[in-house]
Amino acid sequence: MLDLIPYKTLVFDCDGVILDSNKLKTQAYYDTAISYGANETQAQTLVNHHVQYGGISRYPKYEYFIREIMGHVVTDAALKTLLDRFAYEIHRGLLNCELAPELGDLRDTTPDARWMLVSGGDQAELRTLFAERGIDGMFDAGIFGSPDNKDMILAREIANGNLAMQAIFFGDSRYDHQAATRVGLDFVFVSRWTEMEEWQKYCAENNIRVIESLEAVL
């Protein structure tokens, strides 16, 4: 049983932890690449890059796509075209994809802890989405995302006193674990919806606690 009583702040990733949205976003990367003019191989290369760097913002992923995969100069216009298309592709899906079971019950059992969302997703998009789904109120320590990356967000929120220690991070990617441990947060890997390859091996090698989903905490 995971004892959450010592923790003043619970930090959650979004995709694959709060929402079953990993596959939705992976498909959106493929579709946006095709719409940009990539062939199937180039689109799949972007997908592979996205999965390899799970938890990282879409901004550097699309910069990599334009520069390294397509061989083009990265311009603000090209980047905006891809980002806008990506947001359009995923909006309806995010409104309807599955929410972590018993999330409300978990919130009720941690009344003395503050909740924070730290995601690679677009911050404005996340705040709108969570409000539309009626779950923004759970995250009383804030909803944060790109263009700032998770390292920047965590360091900033610790420095300004918003992220109070002792804290724990629930994530589903290598980057989630690395970002959390760099700033002294405990970490739990949430496995049910992850797209991380060989996550079992990584968690075993790094002695990471694993739960299938957030409801397991209850």
Image: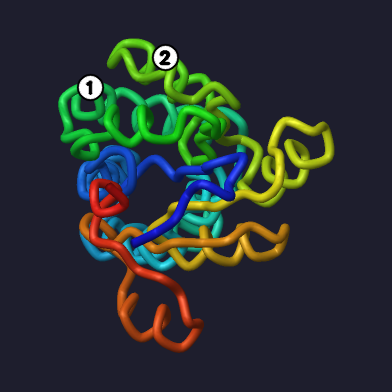
Amino acid type, mark 1: Leu
Using residue 160 as the reference point, say whether residue 205 is left or right of it.
Answer: left
Q: What residue sits 25% from the left and 41% below the top?
A: 21
Q: From where the camera sits, is residue 37 visible?
A: no
Looking at the rendering, which quadrant does residue 104 occupy?
A: top left
Q: What residue sits 54% from the left and 21% below the top?
A: 140
Q: From where the camera sits, is residue 170 visible?
A: yes
Q: CA distance from mark 1 to mark 2?
A: 10 Å
Q: Secondary structure at mark 1?
A: helix
- Give the vertical position of 105 relative to 20 (above or below): above
Looking at the rendering, which quadrant does residue 196 occupy?
A: bottom left
Image coordinates of residue 103 in percent, x first then y, are 28, 34
Amino acid type, mark 2: Thr
Closer to the camera in the image, 139 or 153: 139
Using residue 188 as the reference point, say whether residue 97 is left or right of it.
Answer: left
Q: Secondary structure at mark 2?
A: helix
Q: What residue sits 63% from the left and 45% below the top?
A: 149
Q: Residues within 10 Å of mark 2 (few under 14, many from 20)?
A: few
Earlier in the chain: of badge 1 and badge 2, it is 1
Q: Which residue is mark 1?
A: 95
Closer to the camera in the image, 154 or 211: 211
Using residue 6 as the reference point, say whether residue 120 is left or right of it.
Answer: left
Closer to the camera in the image, 12 or 37: 12
- Give the vertical position of 100 relative to 112 (above or below): below
- Quadrant (top left, top right, bottom left, bottom right) of the N terminus: bottom left
Q: Which residue is mark 2?
A: 128
Image coordinates of residue 139 in percent, x first then y, are 49, 25
- Give the vertical position of 34 relative to 133 (above or below): below
Image coordinates of residue 33 in percent, x first then y, are 32, 46
Q: Residues within 10 Å of mark 1 (few under 14, many from 20)?
A: some
Q: What residue sits 58% from the left and 25% below the top?
A: 142
